[in-house]
Image: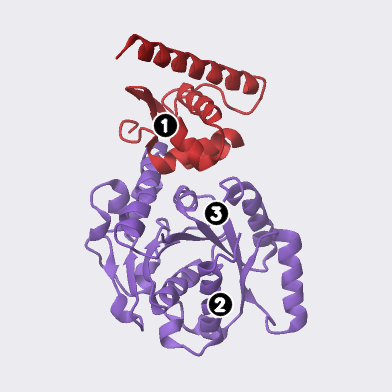
Chain colours: A purple, B red
Amino acid sequence: MGKILAVHSYKGGTGKTLLSVNLASTFARQGKKVCLFDLDFRAPSLFAILNMPNAECWLNDYLNGTCEIDRVLIDMSNKIPGNGKLCVGLANPTTEAIRDMSAKDRKWEMRALGRLLSLRNSLLIDKGFDYIVFDTSPGLQYSSINAIVTADIVVVATTGDRSDVDGTRRMLKELYNLFEKKTGLVINKVLDATSLSKRQEMDKKVREVYQVPMLGVVPCFCDILRAEGGLIFCRDKPDHPFTKLLDEMTKKIENNQIS
Amino acid sequence: MTVLEKIRDNLERINEKMEVMIELQKHSGRKDGAQPLTDTPLDVMTLLSMPDHLRKTAMTICRCGRATAEEIAEQTTRARAVESAYLNQLVLMGYLKKERKGRKAYFSADRDTQG
């Protein structure tokens, strides 16, 4: 059966959406059937990254119970090379929708968790998708924790920022561990990532501070900054080092090389 | 149903109740926030605040939707009696609903009626 990934972080700006879009695209380019969902209801961004301003139904509608998941999914397989399938489900970016989602109560969140959990049956089992990727909002938001509880694997994006390191360490211990989730760490925006001493420093840090498997170390690429979030690397820059890193990360996930 | 079957059913129910009482007794001295509550949604923040032994059971029932203690025990790899006790504790705390169908007791998070 397929797997559900939640891409999460303690702080904003760590590269969750970049990772989510590019991990999903890389899996699709490898021939997999993938669904990518924007679960950042307070600051939706996938619609802008993928240049899809309109949707028949939003993920908000599915979680509200007013439509089924089929009507939320937008097939964008033709934008990815290869024979895979990539569908996306977008969060409604209007101010009204953001306000509405911020005011949900605990009972609604409980039902939303049920709707997310049922995606395992409706998408992975019934429709044969190989991966569902949740792009979440940072920190301890309801929507993010719902995604983490639903997921099989949590991909944690972090940077070298001290407050991020401390917060990430606490989340690993007090959130992912409590829910018994497999967790893989991606350290993003690393300066001098190609030098041996820097790599050794990173390995040591992950071993000692985080105590979880490393999924990847992403150097601070100027091309990523220049792209302003709009690049699908496996399509637009197939020979880029980041594309190769994404290949390595997806292989580790595929081969269960995270615990 | 024959008399023997009725006796067996009753014995099984008595046994189940005793197992629940034993498990509840084990945790009765703990200050782990497991006080009885009513009509409380089983949301993720509640799951986070639960003691570990109950969280595992509660998460499994969230995934299953509706299940017997035996079905939960298969997934958690803990003894059926232990899961039965934890499920009944979650019922007492107001997080789960319990209904009997024949000889089986089904537990659910009751998402449809809690809103």
* Residue at mark 1: chain: B
Q: Nearer the viewer, mark 3 or mark 2?
A: 2
Q: From what the image shows, is residue A83 above or below residue A70? A: below
Residue located 46% across and 31% down the image = B69
Q: Which residue is mark 3?
A: A139
Residue at disc 3, secondary structure? loop
Residue at screen point 29% across, 47% down:
A64
Label 1: few (<14), some (14–19) or many (≥20) C-alpha neighbours in 10 Å: many
Relative image position of residue A130 (x, y in whole percent): 39, 65
Amino acid residing under circle 2: Glu
Q: Residue furthest bottom?
A: A239
Looking at the image, residue A36 sits to the left or right of residue A209; the answer is: left
Callout 3 and callout 2 share a chain: yes
Check disc 1 and report its element: helix, strand or loop: loop
Q: Quadrant of the C terminus of chain A?
A: bottom right
Nearer the N terminus, badge 3 or badge 2? 3
> In the rendered image, which residue does mark 1 sit on?
B68
- Estimate the x, y position of residue A196 in percent, counting from the top left: 75, 82
Q: Position of residue A29 (x, y in %)?
A: 40, 79
| Chain hosting mark 2 | A
Question: Which of the two residues, A34 or B44, is positioned nearer the viewer here?
Answer: A34
* Whether residue A103 can be seen here: no
Dividing the picture into quadrants, the one containing residue B97 is top left
Mark 2, residue position = A248
How many numbered markers are drawn?
Answer: 3
Tell me the distance, in whole angstroms, between the alpha carbons under discs 1 and 2: 42 Å
Query: How far separated are the C-alphas under marks 1 and 3?
Result: 35 Å
Q: Residue at x 31, y 76 (%)?
A: A77
